[in-house]
Amino acid sequence: MNQQRRSILKYSAVFGLMASTGLISLAQAEEWNKAAFEGKSLDDVFKILGAGSPDKSGAITLNAPDIAENGAVVPVGMTTSLKAEQMAILVEKNPSSLAAQFFIPAGTEPFITTRIKMGQTSNIYALVKADGKWSMAVKEVKVTLGGCGG
Amino acid sequence: MSDPMRVRAAENGGIVDVKILMKHDMESGQRKDAAGKLVPAWHITTVNVKANGRDVLNGQFGPAVSKDPFLNFKYKGAKGDKIVVSWVDNKGDKRTDEATAS
């Protein structure tokens, strides 16, 4: 086995441990989480974020249209009464599920609005991490014109 | 060099409402050009917003964020806060713009 592979393995083990203990939350915020954005399915992304299988929560409000005429620009907003540390927006049927992830420092409201692309009609998931635990809200958005291919 | 962002920040009752419009193509990596070749993904990866030098928001974008990304969020602040927004894309391009909370 070659040396480089060994050290990568070792590095990722340490990194994983730090992530699980929350030591790298700051570094995490500044470094683009490539693995999470390349996760194809919801489960992939949940696993990479360490979310497990998040519970649905009524404390999270996900604002998105019922029908989006143009999948290239779908306005999505989320807010919560939980003390959110992280918020993420996922689209189930996009080629990569994770659209955007936000780190909310103390003093910032757990409120985000942005615009995302959707390839086709799909469920949108709003994930919130509060007190170390992930929860979510789900909404289906029908897309008449896809915004990914073309 | 990329085009400037538009940053608006308005204070109301101790809460500053920040609206940011970034200028970026946000190429998804799924689209094909006229010759049928995939156009490689080119999108903003990280966004950082500081108010008076303190982080108020860190964001990470995938290619599924719309062209010319829009962001709206709120933090506890005051009139006159100096807001600095910077982004980095997956080709290493950077852009920083400033605004003052009104």
Image (cartoon, coloured by chain):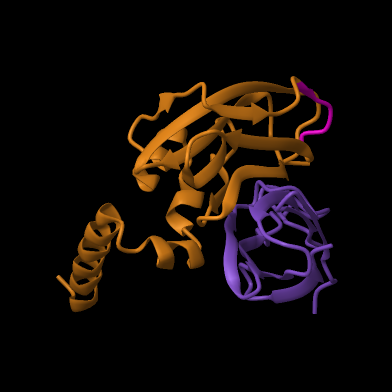
Answer with the quarter of the image where residue A114 lies.
top right
In the image, residue B53 sits, relative to residue B77, either above or below, namely below
- Residue B11: x %, y % from top left: 78, 55
Q: Residue at x 43, y 31 (%)?
A: A135
Q: Is residue B70 left or right of residue A12?
A: right
Q: Which chain is purple?
A: B
- Residue A141: x %, y % from top left: 69, 23
- Residue A92: x %, y % from top left: 55, 31
In the image, residue A9 sits, relative to residue A52, either above or below, namely below
Question: Where does the magenta region start and end?
Answer: A67-71
Answer with the quarter of the image where residue A22 lies.
bottom left
Q: A9 or B34: nearer the eye?
A: A9
- Residue B31: x %, y % from top left: 73, 48
Chain A rendered in what hue?
Answer: orange
Say whether residue B78 is magenta: no
**Viewport quadrant of the C terminus of chain A:** top right
Q: A117 or A103: nearer the eye?
A: A103
The overriding secondary structure of the stretch rendered in magenta is loop
Q: Is residue A68 left or right of residue A105?
A: right
**Viewport quadrant of the N terminus of chain A:** bottom left
Answer with the quarter of the image where residue A99 lies.
top right
Q: Is residue A65 left or right of residue B63?
A: right
